[in-house]
Amino acid sequence: MDRTKEVKIPSSLYRAIEEKIEGSNFPSVSEFVTYAVRKALKELSGYREQLSEEEKEEIKDRLRALGYL
Amino acid sequence: MVVPHGGRLVDRVLKGDERQEALERVHLLPKLELSRDLAFEVENIATGVFSPLEGFLGREDLESVLDHGRLANDVPWTIPIVLDISEDVASSIRDELVLCYRGEPVAIMEVEEVYAYDRVGMALGVYGTTSEEHPGVLKVNGMKDLLVAGKVDLLNQVPSPFPKYKLSPKETRVLFELKGWRTVVGFQTRNVPHIGHEYVQKTALTFVDGLFINPVIGRKKPGDFKDEVIIAAYEALMENYYLRDTAVLAVLQMEMRYAGPREAVHHAIVRKNFGCTHFIVGRDHAGVGNFYPPYAAQEIFEDYPDIGIVPLFFRSFFYCRRCGGVVNEKVCPHGEEYRVSFSGTKLRRTLKGEAEEGGVLIRPEVEEVIRSYPEPFVEGR
């Protein structure tokens, strides 16, 4: 299995990243994009994992009791 | 669902055995009595309203917030959430401190740092002034000499005057999801609703799935409407003029700081944590007197392209006698002589019987509710 895959991004964004990373610790645009995507994925998954089904049901009950549902 | 600020919704509310164990050691620890506003701050930290904060700010974060409007890790944050203590208290605290409100334990704080701060720097950094005419500066000047930083774990909820309308970010996020709202606009208010507010809210609502009306309950300045009047007025408005499926009312227990632009950003971050994707910023948002230019609270968002919530900027709405309706300066070609502005001052004068604009300023049902209170305003100088 390939260790990497190609992903297309707009040329203008590519150029903007190239300019931005010049002189930084990112050796290439690919490294930067990998870092940014990992960060975004971590943020997205962070919230979804927090509520258990039991907790969600408790919240639903409270919202019903308060008249929101 | 929109990602909470900083990537994770903070939840430091102790439950079950963990809470029981903490309650059992409360009597062994030094205690600090909090004001109602500080007790609200503790609860807001622990329930994720102030995500990503897990406690009161340490020196490094405070300096970064004052100097750059960001936490030390570069996450946007504009208002210092700090706990001030006297030197006497500082000398008595150890690793943990019990934070109390009206004698009851609210939270346990892991003390990480006690440090001195610069009042002038704080006043300038947050409010842009050292004038004691500004209520925020007055508050800073009255703070104790030291700050204590550290994470808080909530033991007990702070009693609310409006339990029916008190929701945590976890709860609003579930609520929005169950309502099928993928986009939600938050509306901050410290006022009773006049027709201008209603038009701003409904204009924004035209472009999103739901409206989250979120009045601030807590310390306000004399002359502002009392909390109970604001809630009763919104109940009357929503019952008569809003669809139940597209609008929700819940309170935010947090003091007003009147920090204008910086507070607008703070208000947006807080609503992002509640699950809002958009946030309404009007003219002189969170301002007081003439301390801030009328649209500074909109311009500041240019410094925060990474804030993660879409600010919706509105100019002032007004009633135009020639248009025969509520409009704004982008759509109305008529002159000042035809316009009735929705200023809070005019509303107060109308309610006191000093002006005759009631019919176009405020819904009759709302006016009736406000008039049912003998003294609807916060008293004092």
Image (cartoon, rainbow, N blue to C red):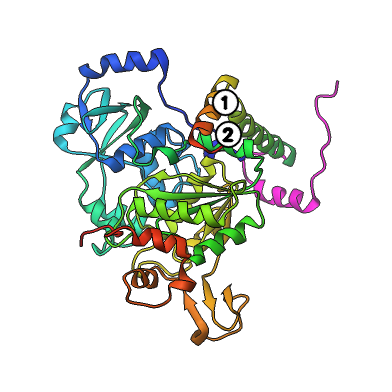
**Is disc 2 placed on a helix, strand or loop?**
helix
Seen in the image, is A7 located left or right of residue B104? right
Comparing B308 with B180, the one in front is: B180
Q: Position of residue B337 (x, y in %)?
A: 49, 87
| Main secondary structure type of the part rendered in magenta | loop
Q: Amino acid at mark 2?
A: Val
Q: Can you say whether B200 is above or below B168 in the image?
A: below
Comparing B15 with B60, the one in front is: B15
The quadrant of the image that shows the C terminus of chain B is: bottom left
| Magenta highlight range | A1-28
Q: Can you say whether B338 is above or below B57 in the image?
A: below
Q: Position of residue B110 (x, y in %)?
A: 32, 25
In reply to whether residue A16 is colored magenta, the answer given is: yes
Comparing B141 with B283, the one in front is: B283
**Residue at x 61%, y 34% (from the top left corner):** A43
Mark 1 neighbour density, 10 Å: few (under 14) some (14–19) many (20 or more): some
**Is disc 1 placed on a helix, strand or loop?**
helix
**Numbered badge on residue B174:** 2
**Numbered badge on residue B319:** none
Tell me how many marks there are: 2
On the question of residue A51 being in view, the answer is no
**Numbered badge on residue A56:** 1
In reply to whether residue B95 is colored magenta, the answer given is: no
Seen in the image, is A21 located left or right of residue B301? right
Q: Position of residue B196 (x, y in %)?
A: 51, 67
Q: Position of residue A63 (x, y in %)?
A: 52, 33
Mark 2 neighbour density, 10 Å: few (under 14) some (14–19) many (20 or more): many
